[in-house]
Amino acid sequence: MSIGDLKLVYVASVVVLSLIIVAPTLTMVVTLPGGERFSELWLLGQNRMAEDYPFNVKANETYKVYLGLGNHLGGLEYYLLYVKFRNQTESLPDSMNGTSSVLEPLSEYRVFLGDSEVWEKEIAFSFEGVAFDGNVCKISNLVLDGLVLNVDKVAAWDSAANGFYCQLFFELWLYNAAPSGFQYHNRFVGIWLNMTIPFQNPK
Amino acid sequence: MSFATRSFVKLAVSAIIVFLALASTFFRCSVRAYTSDEATSKIAEADSKVKQAFAAVSDATEAGANVSSLALRLNEAGGLLAKANVVFRSGDYDNATLLAEQSISLVDGVVQEAGNFKTMAESERLSRLGWAALLASVSLSLLFVVSLFGWRFVKNRYFKSVLEMKPEEVAGN
């Protein structure tokens, strides 16, 4: 090795060492780009697992699901979760266009989450005032977390799937300070429910 | 009148006054009914206050402050505001107004506290940055001086090793 080469190696070593010394200070000033930014939304069954979701439901019986939300957007966020209930003919959110369902929300949850924080809530629901009339099932009230909510929904008999189907779903909205309002965050979760007639013991 | 009788009369009068005060408060509360407009206005006020508090807490978070206590209050206030909206939709304007008022009182002062947290976090950050910069400058200066002496040492060793090299004998000469 010539003296020139040795000098080059020595200078390079000193430069690398200088960078190592300066690195902690630089990290305090320069913010490196983080990973992928997203929000999670999930719905779990009564055992807090992705199974045993309520499906065949009866009036005046309480069912349980767990609604969860995770923030990976890199900062404190303000979320709004709308609870909506629809029959088979009513609109769902459109994932392709990023638009929410046009249905009015029955209930809502407002959650503030820091980065990498999660929120989970047990949601208990039941139905009141369920009447079957030929090929239709009329549902008057949904009881959500002990609060009676008027739904007045009619589910028609689905001959292909043999049931009176309705869907309970949760839409995720995110607060955006720029237009000073909530915007649909293009995420929703829901469960299909088949309204069934309670078995009556003949006497 | 004996001392015991006077004390009893005083106690009885005080009890009556307290009872009347409580009864009048209860009566006032029970007869106060809020209209849809009043409830809407109170909910809008709560919504605006919660959003302002969120913005302040968010700023404090970005400055590196620990805002867990404020986030807890925000979540409670948000929960009350959500309930206020739900009961408003069901036509219960009294409870909607009361819940909105509770939400407002919960976030009351959050903006100021978040501002204080932010200022503290920024000054701590500046102080940390100052110390880190000082430490880095001292270390770099030290490295520069040591590297100069180091280079002299390395150069001397290099020349010494070159001078100590023996000429290779080439076979066949």
Image: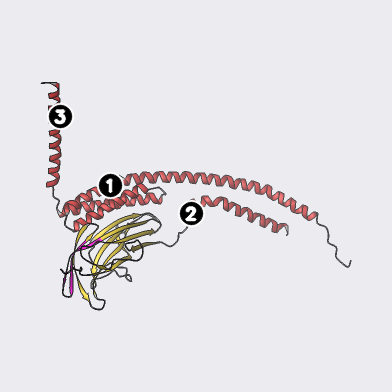
Q: Which label was assigned to residue A176?
A: none
Which residue appears at 55% of the width and 51% of the height?
A22
Q: Which residue is mark 2?
A: A30
Q: Secondary structure at mark 1?
A: helix
Q: Which residue is mark 1?
A: B106
On the same chain, marks 2 and 1? The answer is no
Q: Nearer the viewer, residue A70 or B41?
A: A70
| Mark closer to the observer (2, 1) | 1
Residue A135, image quadrant? bottom left
Which residue appears at 64% of the width and 46% of the height?
B145
The magenta segment: A125-142
Residue A162 position (above or below residue B81): below
Tags 2 and 1 touching, CB below 8 Å: no
Is residue B80 shown left or right of residue A138? right
Q: Residues within 10 Å of mark 3 (few under 14, many from 20)?
A: few
> Is residue A181 shown to the viewer in this render?
no
Q: Residues within 10 Å of mark 1 (few under 14, many from 20)?
A: many
Q: Quadrant of the N terminus of chain A?
A: bottom right
Mark 1 falls within which chain? B
Q: Nearer the viewer, residue A64 or B129?
A: A64
Mark 3 falls within which chain? B
Is residue A130 part of the magenta span, yes or no? yes
Q: Which residue is mark 3?
A: B11
